């Protein structure tokens, strides 16, 4: 009886620890999900407005949230709110965005 009780308490503690680990990985900004940026894009993503030439960047988390709330829409320019924006490489002077160069 005593051993069964200990096993149940031990199993319950392990379940609580695992659940806490999953929660922290999902919601606390760890590298397992929810962080600001990824290893592939440590500085986020870079954009250029085709209306006024304004350049801006968004973190991976911001971009993911934008696409979640606005499927299929590009993020707007923070300066003029135009949706005529294209992804660009950091420091690039190309007029053509990444999307346009690799779409063919």
Image (tube, rainbow, N blue to C red):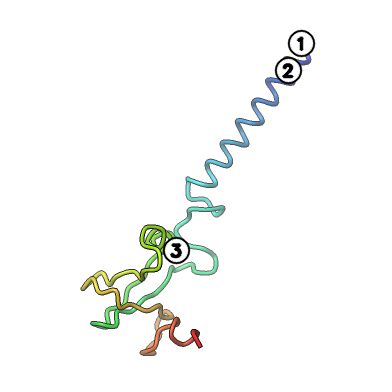
Q: Position of residue 52 (x, y in %)?
A: 23, 82
5 relative to 19 in the view: left or right? right
Residue where numbered disc 1 is placed: 2
Quadrant where the N terminus sits is top right
Residue where numbered disc 2 is placed: 6
Q: Position of residue 70 (x, y in %)?
A: 36, 62
Tell me which label, 2 or 3, sits earlier in the chain.
2
Residue occupying image coordinates x 52% and y 43%: 24
Q: Report if the CB atoms under discs 2 and 1 are less than 8 Å apart.
A: yes
51 relative to 74 in the view: left or right? left
Mark 2–mark 3 distance (CA, rounded to whole Å): 45 Å
Q: Nearer the viewer, residue 72 or 10?
A: 72
Residue occupying image coordinates x 70% and y 20%: 8
Does dot 2 land on a helix, a strand or a loop?
A: helix
Number of residues whose C-alpha sits closer than 10 Å to that of mark 3, classed few (under 14), some (14–19) or many (20 or more): many
Residue occupying image coordinates x 44% and y 63%: 60
Q: Report if the CB atoms under discs 2 and 3 are less than 8 Å apart.
A: no
Instruction: Write down the quadrant of residue 49 in the picture.
Output: bottom left
Q: Report if the CB atoms under discs 3 and 1 are less than 8 Å apart.
A: no
**Residue 60 disc label:** 3
Number of residues whose C-alpha sits closer than 10 Å to that of mark 2, classed few (under 14), some (14–19) or many (20 or more): few
65 relative to 3 in the view: left or right? left
């Amino acid at each position: 009886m005593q051993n069964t009780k200990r096993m149940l308490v031990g199993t319950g503690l392990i379940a609580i620890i695992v659940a806490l680990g999953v929660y922290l990985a999902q919601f606390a900004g760890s590298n397992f999900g929810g962080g600001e940026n990824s290893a592939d894009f440590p500085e986020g993503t870079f954009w250029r407005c085709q209306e006024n030439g304004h350049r801006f960047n968004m973190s991976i988390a911001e971009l993911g949230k934008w696409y979640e709330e606005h499927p299929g829409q590009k993020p707007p320019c923070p300066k003029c709110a135009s949706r005529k924006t294209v992804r660009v490489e950091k420091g690039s002077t190309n007029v053509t965005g990444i999307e346009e160069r690799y779409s063919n």
